[in-house]
Amino acid sequence: MYFISTFLAYTDPRYDGINQEGLVPKCKVYLVITLYISTVEDVEIVTKDVDMEVTLSSKSYAVFKFFAPEKVDHVFLTIVDSVSCKDCDFFNVRIQPHNVPSMFKSIKSLDIPVANFSRQNYSINIWTPENAWYYLRFQFTQKTFSLINGGFFTFRLKFFLLPELINENVTLNLNNSNFDTYVPDPVFRLHRDGNISNIMSYNEYDLVRERNSDNFVYGYDLRPKKNGKIPLYINATNDKFTVLKFVIQDSTDSGGTAQFHLAVKPRAKYVNGKRIVETDPENNQVVACIRKGVRELPLWPHNCFFNNISQPSPIFVNKTVENASVMIPYPEPGTWFISIRLFCGSCESCNCSNHCQHKHETCMQVCEENCEPEQCNNCTNTCRQSVIEEDECRGCDCIGGCKRNNINCNTSIVFEVASFSCVDGTCGDNGKCVFSISEGFVVTSCFCTNNYRGWECSDNSQANPYSAIVVEMVLLTLSNLMFVPAVYLAIKRHYYIESLTYTLLCLSSTFYHACDAGENIISYCLIRLNILLFSVI
């Protein structure tokens, strides 16, 4: 789903000229939007472990697609039996999920010089988010135009599903009669943290949606226990991370603000009947990542890693920062993932050289290209172990950006995933939450008063000071005292009807200014403002 937003350039009204209403023409903008959509017809679907033979001219490109189901960890693309076109310069491979890639937009790209194209096989590892269509684009490029020119190649896809047999060492005693908490089965997935690949496990919780009758107000909770109670926290250890999964529905849920709050549950114990609250160790830190469609890997000290891209984590909690939150205005519909990981002890940074990383990648490429299906899942551990056993590569034995150690720790994490209209359902003291409808889409936004600005009307850079508002209201209210001389003269000259009229005007104007002049910050309204306005008119 794509959105297009347009707006007029903002002009500060303080610097606009003062004009009489109705004497100056109003500026209206009429916007005409034309959308051109380029489609690719007859895209062939590729299945795993099937050789696809492609003949391609230099004037065109070929597009294929494949579906990566939920259990697929990554996909291995191999290009073999290639014959390059005569006058071409490069063979280009582009890969993109959800839509057809272009030469300039893709998540994976490979540009092979044609001089090397026919001499060896080429392969690409594709890290696939679950339940997504992926598109492959192949093209020969050349600097000089040739009418008849082309090439030939064969490619195949190999899907890697991390086996369930890894779970043999993870057991859960369900025969315990006291066990009533929902604990998901561990999931094992291949991850990279900027060094070498590592198989890591995580617990994934499918959150249950809780709907409210108000618009854009809903939340997510853990699955109830057998006794019907909802767990208030999750347990986290440093040997695996935790994933929270929730779904934001299309259109009806995207007009508010999604909020994620995270805190560490205080440790409490009873000594001689007294409750003692303990603090977490000083070196403990919880890092959380939130993103639509993919599970990011939390790294030390506060980073999120996915698809060879590392970016700052929006949330991290430690002894100094006891709780944290992040707000996402107008969240996109789809499946969202929150990855949470606990780090403990001191972190010794990884020192994995490029040579060691290249050696590991080469080992993985050769192993995954030539392995039998039942043996392919051993490639990661085999290559990793062979690399870190070398003296120059011992710094590559890392997990989460830190060298592996024998320290174990655990904690309990309290979280909240919810959505509200505007910001927590309000816009503070300087605005009100309003609903806007445009072309069938409903969104909430803050309507600010007293020249306040910002998402939640908290920017007071152009707001009037409170003292100035008080002075403005007092002066406007006292200005009605100018009616007093007119009333006095009318009574003295026996113009009683006129004196009554001036008195009523004085009172109604005074009440009107007392109700309206305070910029919605301070006001004293005896009756509704529209009635006072009618009485003044």
Image (tube, helix red, strand yellow):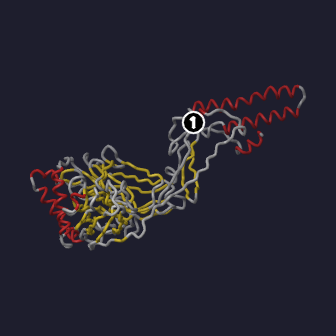
**Residue 296, quarter of picture:** bottom left
**Residue 517, quarter of picture:** top right
Position of residue 82 in the picture relative to residue 469 (left or right): left
| Residue designated by label 1 | 12
Q: Is residue 22 above or below residue 203?
A: above
Position of residue 349 in the picture relative to residue 510 (left or right): left
User: In the image as oriented, which residue stretches furthest toward the front?
Assistant: 147
Q: Residue at x 26, y 65 (%)?
A: 77
Q: Where's residue 93, x and y in %?
A: 30, 60
Q: Nearer the viewer, residue 379 or 267?
A: 379
Amino acid of disc 1: Asp
Q: Where's residue 375, x and y in %?
A: 18, 71
User: In the image as oriented, which residue stretches furthest toward the right?
Assistant: 494
Q: Where's residue 335, x and y in %?
A: 40, 62
Position of residue 17 in the picture relative to residue 120 (left or right): right
Q: Is residue 516 visible?
A: yes
Q: Where's residue 270, x and y in %?
A: 29, 54
